[in-house]
Amino acid sequence: MSGRARLALCAYAATLLAAGALIPLVDGVGWLVQAAVLLGVQSGVGALARRVPLARTLTIAVQTLVTLLLLTLVFVRDHALFGVVPGPDALMRLGELLVAGGEDVGTYAIPAPMTDGIKLMVVGGVLLIGLAVDALAVTFRSAAPAGLPLLALYSVAAGLSDGGASWLWFLLAASGYLLLLLAEGRDRLSQWGRVFGGAARNSGGLADGLAGVGGGSSPVRTGRRIGVLALGIALVAPLALPALDSGLLGGKGPGNGRGSGGGTISAVNPLVSLQNNLNQPDNREVMTYRSNIENPQSLYLRILALDEFNGSEWRSSTRRLTDVPDRLPQPTGLGRDVSVTEVRTNISASRSYQQTYLPLPYPASEVRVGGRWRYEPEGRTLVGDDGQTTRGAQYEVGSLVVEPTADQLAAAGSPPQELVREYTQVPGSLPGVVAETAEQVTEGASNAYEQAVKLQDWFASDGGFTYDTTVTSGTGSSAITRFLRDREGFCIHFSFSMAAMARTLGIPARVAVGFTPGTMKADGAISVGLRDAHAWPELYFEGVGWTRFEPTPSRGSTPSWTRPDVPTDSASDVAQPSAGTSAEPSATPSAEDSCPPQLRQEGGCGPSQEPGAALPADRGTPLWKVLLVVHAAVLLVAALVLSPLLWRLRARNRRLGSGGRTPAHAAARTLAAWREISDEAWDHGIAPDESLTPRKAAARIVRLGRLDTTAAEAVHRIAGSVEQVLYAPEPRPAAGLAEDALTVRAGLRASAGRGARLRATLLPRSSVRVVWAVSERRTALAERWAGRPGAGRWTARLRRLTRQHG
């Protein structure tokens, strides 16, 4: 076997060994066998291409093409030409599978079921990593950098498996990499002849300086020893450094200590997969509960608090854990003059809901739960120990309903300086516009309470903000600035922005993550679903403690203490819960929809309602996002080629997505749907004619597009809606515009030939609008530059320099 063939075989083996770390993430191992076969074909094609020989770039291009053909054959053969050639329908189907896989990853607990989407992500990811390893180690003959994609593959698995990627997978991945290095070393040394090994101990005692396999210390053996030494250091170093919370082997990290006072809770961010789950079509039930509280709509189930803002994200600080006390201590800052009622709540979590933190009404005073749980006093949260999760948990919680009055909050004294220092910190990267906006909004307020109410009302109603789940997510300074400028977002943006602005005003603030109260069922229990997950700000007032505010419009309930016309003046009363209303929770969760009542009244319970922070099996960064980042370099060229297609998909989603409920929003949706079918017709060869009325333009699309009756009726319905919003004295918003637009698209594609469909998908003519937009932006900038003082002098100087240099 030649040296390069040996190297290719080692690259194949190293990729498969590293891919073994993905086994704990999904059910079954059949995918690994399939990946091994496909990876073998990919490697064999590379070997043949190098034997021809082809140029290095052509070799990689051929392997990439074959990989795409293999994925098409395995996953979307029914949509492909001759079962293997990826046409537009096959590419669209692959994209749909990737999106479905991303949703499945965010939905299922580890190990996840092997759905088609997850299987495509896992097998496709292994093939991409194998292509990168083969290209680096074999095609470019540089095995050392090939360890980077192997490390990325193992790191993804170790980071997501929460300890499932044991030392065995690390040893396999490391052994594969060392094998690859050894093969490259032998290949390089073979080009120089036999290895000089020093004096060989033969029977005659003569030194054979050119003994190929003697007992001397050859460079190959030295390299092998260096590799073993590096592997040993990688294994031992994490154990010897107490500052590291977990080792390279994916061992149990913080929060898993035993005994009193042991362990810590590390800084985590439970919001990393929020937007992925925001638009899930199924509002899967995660828990049910029964409570003797008088007003269930005020019973938020809180998971944890994010109290550290570093400029790039909000996260929870590293805290010390203790054993769960029989009675939780008095909440920080709560005085005796505030009205307090104790209630009892019985909660039953679904078996599909796995979360390290236990959802509790805030502030909890007593928790009775089985299993291994630890208590974090600062945030008053319970954290699972040694792999403990909420899956199937049934527990009883005593909690306090704290009802301060507006006067009590307005008269709150100064918080302790230590608390102020910690909870009013803002990063230096926070733009000044955040503090300036906070000052403007709260102008005229005489105390911190009035400032907080003004901020809440500005976000919820007075500031013109729109609740929109399609807005780009983000939790850092730039996301807050963008949110304040565009005034569109969901609960993350509202809560994080209000907390940051409160901190700039000197009010201690943090962000709580959990669930809104849920929906009452027929049997008296309350169902909490994914869409009830939420984030809200908590502000500290001395004498009351951490107090909830609700800046997100149409979500949750506005606290009574922020409504001056509904004062709460009852005296402090610690009531005993009624035995009749505190029944055991239902053991079999219901699948009933849990849309909040006020949102149902507004007609907003579509597929884009917000789930939130703590989601089932959310153990960190979702697999689909990590894989996209790891494969970004490999997919960069493909992304450039497919940029018109991606722009067209994005434009279609924005035009046909939800956009508010006011008449102005209805008119905008109608015009957007008309623009969408006009561009779709353009993509299929029917150029737009701006001189035609909507009715005549619709007739032209029907005629030239050879649309069937259903699609033709859809075109005319949208054209009629456009005439309504343009010419009617009182336009009537129409329903079903998005469905009609998709019907027209299906009709155009059905009547077009295969080549026309391919061009409309990959090279849509309407994507020229991007060029037009850039041109208009450039013209506007040029006009703005020309209007600046001294611009003419700089332009003349630039022209002279241009002439001098030809």
Image (tube, helix red, strand yellow):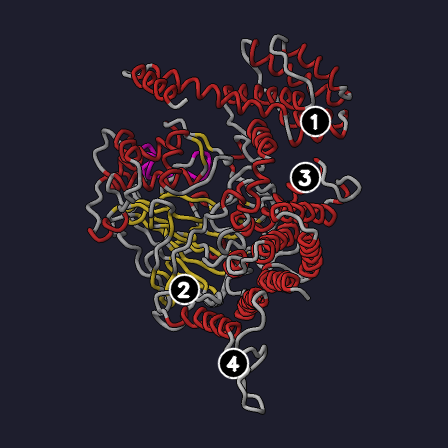
Nearer to us of marks 4 and 1 is 4
First to last magenta residue range: 553-567
First along the sequence among labels 3 and 1:
3
Say which of 248 and 51 sits in front. Answer: 51
The residue where tag 2 is placed is 254
Residue 216: mark:
4
First along the sequence among labels 2 and 1:
2
Determine the CA span between mark 3 and mark 1: 20 Å
Determine the CA span between mark 2 and mark 1: 53 Å
Q: Which SS class for mark 4?
A: loop
Residue 367, above or below 559? below
The residue where tag 1 is placed is 743
> Residue drawn 36% across and 18% down?
799
First along the sequence among labels 2 and 4:
4
Say which of 555 and 520 sits in front. Answer: 555
Visible residue check, residue 39: yes
Which amino acid is tagged 4? Answer: Gly
Q: Which SS class for mark 3?
A: helix
The residue where tag 3 is placed is 91
> Residue drawn 64% across and 41% down?
95
638 lies left or right of 486: right
Pointer 2 local density, CA inside 10 Å: few below 14, some 14–19, many at least 20? many
Determine the CA span between mark 4 and mark 1: 76 Å
